[in-house]
Amino acid sequence: MPNIFHSKNKKNMSVLIFIDQSDGHLKKASFEAAAYGAAIAKQFNTNALALVLGNVADDLTQLGNYGISKVYQAQNDSFNHVDALVFAQVIAAVVKQLEASVVVFSHTQTGKAVAPGVAVQLKAGLVAGACALPDTTNGFVVKKTVFSGKAFALVNITTPIKVITLNPNSFGVQTTTGNATVEALDVEVPAASVKILATNKVSGEVPLSEADIVVSGGRGLKGPENWGMIEDLAHVLHAATACSRPVADAHWRPHHEHVGQTGVQIAPNLYIAIGISGAIQHLAGVNRSKTIVVINKDPEAPFFKAADYGIVGDAFEVVPKLTAAIKEMRSK
Amino acid sequence: MKILVCISKTPDTTAKIAFKNNNTQFEDAGVQWIINPYDEWYALIKAIELKEKDPSVILHLITVGGADCDVIIRKALALGGDEAIRVDTESDDSYVIATQIAAVAKEGSYDLIFTGKETIDYNGSAVGGMLAEMLQMPYIALATQFELNGSQAKVTREIEGGEEVDEVTLPAVISCQKGMAEQRIPNMRGIMAARTKPLKVVAPVATEALTHIVQYELPPAKAGVKLVTADDVATLVKLLHEEAKVI
Ligand SMILES: Cc1cc2nc3c(=O)[nH]c(=O)nc-3n(C[C@H](O)[C@H](O)[C@H](O)COP(=O)(O)OP(=O)(O)OC[C@H]3O[C@@H](n4cnc5c(N)ncnc54)[C@H](O)[C@@H]3O)c2cc1C
Ligand SMILES: Cc1cc2nc3c(=O)[nH]c(=O)nc-3n(C[C@H](O)[C@H](O)[C@H](O)COP(=O)(O)OP(=O)(O)OC[C@H]3O[C@@H](n4cnc5c(N)ncnc54)[C@H](O)[C@@H]3O)c2cc1C
């Protein structure tokens, strides 16, 4: 079996996982990327190393629970915002210093901004949006989603260093037990290429891309005044809320809730679609959800073909009942 | 001010996704091709708005692809832009595409380069970031608002759980998504004008692909929906809890 890690020097073999943080906290998607990178390291009987940039309040040794043996942390105030040019240069330098062969990011806003630059710096092949472990029986073949989730491509990376961004919720946050050691890393910090004027975070809500459960409403809900029952259902499920494109276009809901081919693409464990017909462009953004529930008064709505569970009925009647039933189950 | 907008062609959003030759090639028979929606609705329209505000802006469009892309680039020219460039080569590797665009961009010394957020076929969201790195320009990914002030721009971009407002000194590469501009429909005058706008075909620079698509797969078919009656939501809750184990 051809093994890219078969080099003379045993040190030349590690997998480096970039751990993204936001306001000093590690993110769920980063734990998943850590577990994925650790699984690759295991395939090759090598070490999974993590890189954290910036000041972090969370305990970094907990990354051991996802298979990381060593965490490198470079602290600098300028790392608390993602500057793509700066991050790409710093991360590429660390990859070279640690002689890592595989670099893993999560396919989130940060990964999308930074991984392509890292790949160019290292002249490494990039697979963006991976959804499975590499198959190394014949090269280094990574499966990724294409056509907005309607198909997969198996992509062979032919360069010595490989860069992968992992689709959130595609591998699972797999845990093990272990403690990671943390080592401070001195890196050269390039001059900033952008100046941050402001950051506005939506507080108090579950961010769509990180939510395990998403409750979504469409034009069938008739108007923004009817979203109370959607929010109630989302609340009992600790879910994020989403909507179809016409709903965002009509300003019934904010644009960042628009899911689909031209909106946010999500892959929660549970997606509940209420009063949404299931147009192909809508499905393209949600078809990677593990379980889909559809509530629609039209039995012919195309969404039922893509669903796991469904109720044919009037949302205004069904949704409050559903919320009550979940509350009741939770109280038992 | 010189602006370059990167245009890629993708199958229509309703196209049936199927593969041929032992699942190694996309089945393009009967497929309608469109301008990648992010490139058209957000990147191109925003650039056109900037030119409408300041007619001295020079607006070029670029695509990397075969002669079959000409229809798409003419469609883009019908919306606006002064001229188009097609680099005559095909690749499914983002690095190759970015290398080709970077070569043209260096030559043209553009102040601003707009790309879409991602292509809706290969979903790389990579070309913009690669291009920025190759040109050593600041890269603002996933921009939702853009305001030009002389040689600087104020750009709002999506970050995890919210947004960030950045100030950047040009030249810069911006990847565009929803919010940047409103969709437009080309008018007859634009379509007529596009026929006579220059479309330069240039030869590719030498480079090699760093990745290769080996094969495609379709997702397994869904088992079929389990329907529950409207007055029996308790059963649905039970199924979600015990069978699907998602609540
Ligand atoms: C290039 C392109 C890109 C697009 N991108 C996206 C995208 O990213 N995301 C997206 O969502 N769309 C997108 N669209 C639009 C898409 O084609 C559909 O038009 C849209 O998804 C429809 O939204 P909807 O389901 O909310 O509304 P409708 O299609 O109007 O469906 C409303 C549904 O509600 C049901 N309903 C009505 N009343 C009730 C009731 N009382 N109780 C229960 N059900 C009820 C109806 O039976 C119907 O099925 C795109 C289109 C194009 C051309
Ligand atoms: C199945 C399949 C079939 C394909 N068929 C063809 C084909 O028939 N003919 C062909 O020429 N190419 C074809 N391609 C190439 C494809 O259209 C893209 O150009 C290339 O794969 C880069 O995609 P990406 O997802 O990495 O781009 P992304 O990084 O997601 O793109 C981001 C942005 O970069 C810009 N960009 C991307 N690609 C180009 C480009 N080619 N030219 C200019 N700007 C671009 C756009 O602004 C885009 O919004 C095919 C790709 C696939 C996967």
Image (cartoon, rainbow, N blue to C red):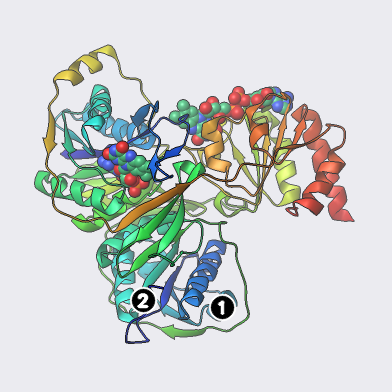
Q: Position of residue B172 (x, y in %)?
A: 24, 50
Query: What quarter of the picture does the C terminus of chain A occupy?
Result: bottom right
Q: Is residue B36 above or below residue A171?
A: above
Circle 1: residue type: Asp
Q: Position of residue A139 (x, y in %)?
A: 38, 65
Q: Residue at x 46, y 37 (%)?
A: B18
Q: Earlier in the sequence, mark 2 or mark 1?
A: 1
* Along the viewing direction, whichever of B185 and B26 lies nearer the viewer: B26
Circle 2 chain: A
Q: Residue at x 75, y 30 (%)?
A: A315
On the image, numbered disc 1 is attached to which residue?
A: A59
Q: Residue at x 23, y 44 (%)?
A: B113
Quadrant housing residue A123: bottom left
Please indicate, yes or no, whether residue B15 appears anywhere in the rendered image.
yes
Circles 2 and 1 on the same subunit: yes
Q: Position of residue B218 (x, y in %)?
A: 52, 44
Q: In the picture provided, is B56 more to the left or to the right than A176?
A: left
Query: What quarter of the picture does the N terminus of chain A occupy?
Result: bottom left
Query: How far apart are labels 2 and 1 at the CA level?
Result: 24 Å
The secondary element bearing badge 1 is classed as loop
Q: Is mark 1 within 8 Å of ligand 2?
A: no
Q: In the picture provided, is B35 more to the left or to the right than B201?
A: right
On the image, numbered disc 2 is attached to which residue?
A: A100
Circle 1 chain: A
